[in-house]
Image (cartoon, grey):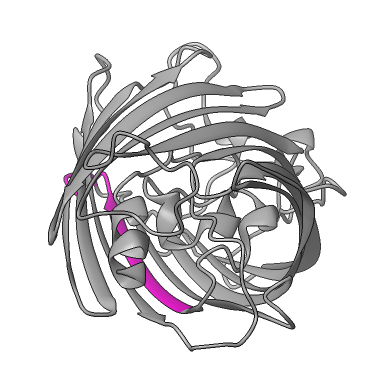
């Protein structure tokens, strides 16, 4: 039953985000702490994830991103640890990004009322980035301001084989009503690191703020989730999210998913408040014992020539151990 619960909640997927060097994913739930470090260990189990995304496949400058992750909790399930690696290939090796990071999360039990428990989750992440640039990398002064056509000339030195390394930090907090409601916020790129090889302002990785809320409803019990520690085989999930990154990125999101075991489906809409690309995302997944698999299709609804769609495939494996300590059953 616990594995079914994890699989069900994975059905509700979060908004993807992109700006500057940031990689993009639709389904943050394959590794929830990519959205908020406070969610490290929120599966209350050992969780291993694999995610692959191919964005704009019909264009020559398509993106390919692979993410591996591991997280678990320990010491009465109040402390959590995470490790992850991300490989991002932009524009056929125009820019290759390698990111490796560690994270720590801590859960504090605030109160209990009528069988419902309240928790505060805190989390931090630290990562090292290694960016490498290919021969086709172009700078802003290679384009005409009005037409956007390439001039082929730049004031910068050659960049083929050039690279840069920097560190990055993130922090998050979440308030949780056990097994029902999660409300949180996070800050990424706290130090606003310089991420490029040219001394330009647009190479700064600006702080990104995320505000999110999610609700889980048991469709088989009239009492919902009050006083319960597990979900049934039929559940509904609703999610809202807003992300902001100065000066260009403002995105609002709403998603919903339903689980009728062993099948999970979901639908989400992303609205770019900055005039960017709007997206409708469709998700279909399933679960077998501790293994879950998901496919996400992004349909771009904006009138822009951007390749029209993206594909994402996700796998997650949950291994839950039997421990003597009770745990806050909180899922994203």
Can residue 132 be seen here? The reply is: yes
Image location (x, y in percent) of residue 52 = 32, 65
Horizontal side, residue 97 vs residue 107: left or right: left
Tell whether position 58 is magenta: yes
Residue 170 appears anywhere in the view? no
- Asked whether 224 or 300 is in front, the reply is 224
Between 140 and 288, the residue placed more toward the observer is 288
Q: Say which residue appears at 79% left-offset and 65% top-offset.
A: 166
Q: Is residue 233 above or below residue 140?
A: below
Question: Is residue 128 left or right of 193 when viewed as pictured?
Answer: left
Q: Main secondary structure of the magenta part?
A: strand
The answer to which quarter of the image holds residue 16 is: top left
- Looking at the rendering, the stretch of residues picked out in magenta corresponds to 47-59
Residue occupying the far front of the picture: 114
Q: Quadrant of residue 170?
A: bottom right
How many circles with numbers are drawn on the protein? 0
Q: Quadrant of the N terminus?
A: bottom left
| Residue positioned 29% across, 50% down in the render | 11
| Image position, residue 104 (x, y; %) | 75, 70
Residue 42 found in image quarter: bottom right
Q: Position of residue 141 (x, y in %)?
A: 62, 32
């Amino acid at each position: 039953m616990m594995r079914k619960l994890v699989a069900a909640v994975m059905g509700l997927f979060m908004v993807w985000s992109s700006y500057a060097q940031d990689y993009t994913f639709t389904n943050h739930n394959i590794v929830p702490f990519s959205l908020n470090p406070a969610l490290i260990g929120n599966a209350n189990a050992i969780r291993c994830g694999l995610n692959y995304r191919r964005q704009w496949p019909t264009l020559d400058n398509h993106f390919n991103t692979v993410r591996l992750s591991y997280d678990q909790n320990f010491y009465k399930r109040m402390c959590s640890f995470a490790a992850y690696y991300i490989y991002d290939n932009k524009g056929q090796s125009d820019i290759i990004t390698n990111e490796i990071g560690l994270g720590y999360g801590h859960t504090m039990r605030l109160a209990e009322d009528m069988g419902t428990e309240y928790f505060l989750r805190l989390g931090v992440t630290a990562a090292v980035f290694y960016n490498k640039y290919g021969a086709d990398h172009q700078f802003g002064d290679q384009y005409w301001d009005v037409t956007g056509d390439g001039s082929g000339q730049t004031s910068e030195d050659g960049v083929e084989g050039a690279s840069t390394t920097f560190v990055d930090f993130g922090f998050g907090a979440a308030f949780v009503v056990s097994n029902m409601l999660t409300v949180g916020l996070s800050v990424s790129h706290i130090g606003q690191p310089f991420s490029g090889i040219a001394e330009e302002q647009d190479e700064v990785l600006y702080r990104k703020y995320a505000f999110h809320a999610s609700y889980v409803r048991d469709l088989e019990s009239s009492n919902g989730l009050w006083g319960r520690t597990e979900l049934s085989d039929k559940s509904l999930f609703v999610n809202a999210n807003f992300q902001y990154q100065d000066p260009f990125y403002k995105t609002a999101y709403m998603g919903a998913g339903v689980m009728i075991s062993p099948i999970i489906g979901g639908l989400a809409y992303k609205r770019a408040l900055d005039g960017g690309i709007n997206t409708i995302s469709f998700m279909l997944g399933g679960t077998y014992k501790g293994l879950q698999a998901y496919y996400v299709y992004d349909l771009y609804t904006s009138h822009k020539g951007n390749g029209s769609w993206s594909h994402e495939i996700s796998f997650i494996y949950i291994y839950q151990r039997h421990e003597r300590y009770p745990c806050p059953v909180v899922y994203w």
